[in-house]
Image (cartoon, coloured by chain):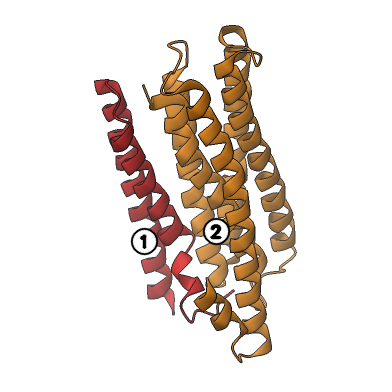
Chain colours: A orange, B red
């Protein structure tokens, strides 16, 4: 991290230096968010060991994981398109990512309606399940909102004249949401 | 970077996605086998995280000299 900071603060053209600093700031933000998820995941193992209720909908868990992985690909393509001045590709990628994010959110809502009957929030597993999926769903929601703002700006041609930092930042945040789920999915659904 | 660079970048994304899909399938199958395979699951999760961090999030940019953005 020290190397990164030194690199970011080195003498550079004004725009490039600003982007490097923005990037470092975003990574620090992501690192701090990771601590929050890590604490909840650790609490889940501390409280329950490797216990997973049989009522969990495994297919839904796998489906949600697939949706989120696919959304990372569409987000990546949107960023690549923005970097190469392909405005249409960027907008298409962003829109697909937003739709997949909304689909994921709907899937979690359905999962909650099922889970509430089998392990309500006042049970040990319910506490872990609703805390982790709730925190993650909140990040999905904010990610969708950020991408929607970026999409709106992109439609007005904001990222084609030069910097596409806005797209990169929104997409990086979205990938973080995916990384968080990569840790949450086995923690809640697969360990036994 | 021209069109070729753009296509290469798009391809890299698809390859990363396929690798992630395969790792997810392995993860699901390992869990289906039963037993407390926590280490195996943790290993797969770390691999998946690493693929996303490097291929999609370009973590190494922090140490490199990339200035796009």
Task: Classify residue A156 by image quadrant.
Answer: bottom right
**Left or right of residue B67, residue A189 in this image:** left
Task: Classify residue A142 by image quadrant.
Answer: top right
A124 and B67: which one is in front? Answer: A124
Chain of the residue displaying label 2 = A
| Label 2: element kind | helix
Residue A84: assigned label: none
Classify A41 as above or below A79: above
Classify A187 as above or below B14: above
Task: Classify residue A137 by image quadrant.
Answer: top right
A54 and B7: which one is in front? Answer: A54
Residue A78: assigned label: 2
A157 and A71: which one is in front? Answer: A71
Classify A138 as above or below A22: above
Classify A8 as above or below A172: below
Give the residue number, with chain letter if any, for mark 1: B12
> Percent from the top left, x then y, of residue A90?
58, 60
| Residue at 45% across, 57% down | B53
Q: Residue furthest left?
A: B33
> Percent from the top left, x then y, of residue A3?
50, 78
């Amino acid at each position: 991290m020290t190397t990164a900071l030194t690199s970011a603060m080195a003498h550079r053209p004004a725009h490039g230096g600003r982007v490097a600093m923005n990037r470092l700031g975003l990574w620090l933000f992501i690192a701090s968010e990771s601590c929050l998820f890590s604490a909840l995941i650790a609490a889940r193992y501390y409280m329950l060991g490797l216990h997973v209720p049989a009522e969990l909908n495994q297919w839904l868990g796998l489906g949600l994981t697939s949706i989120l992985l696919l959304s990372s690909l569409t987000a990546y393509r949107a960023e690549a398109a923005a970097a190469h001045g392909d405005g249409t590709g960027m907008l298409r990628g962003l829109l697909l990512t937003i739709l997949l994010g909304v689909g994921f959110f709907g899937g979690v809502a359905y999962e909650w309606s099922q889970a509430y009957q089998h392990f309500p929030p006042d049970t040990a597993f319910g506490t872990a399940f609703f805390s982790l999926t709730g925190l993650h769903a909140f990040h999905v929601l904010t990610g969708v909102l950020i991408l929607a703002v970026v999409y709106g700006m992109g439609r007005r041609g904001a990222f084609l004249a030069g910097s596409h930092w806005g797209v990169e930042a929104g997409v990086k945040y979205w990938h973080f949401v995916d990384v968080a789920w990569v840790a949450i999915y086995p923690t809640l659904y697969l360990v036994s | 970077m021209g069109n070729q660079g753009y296509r290469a970048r798009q391809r890299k994304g698809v390859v990363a996605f396929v690798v992630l899909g395969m790792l997810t399938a392995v993860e699901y199958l390992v869990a289906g086998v039963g037993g407390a395979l926590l280490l195996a699951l943790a290993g797969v999760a770390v691999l998946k995280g690493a693929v996303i961090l490097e291929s999609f999030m370009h973590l190494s940019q922090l140490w490199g000299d990339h200035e796009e953005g």
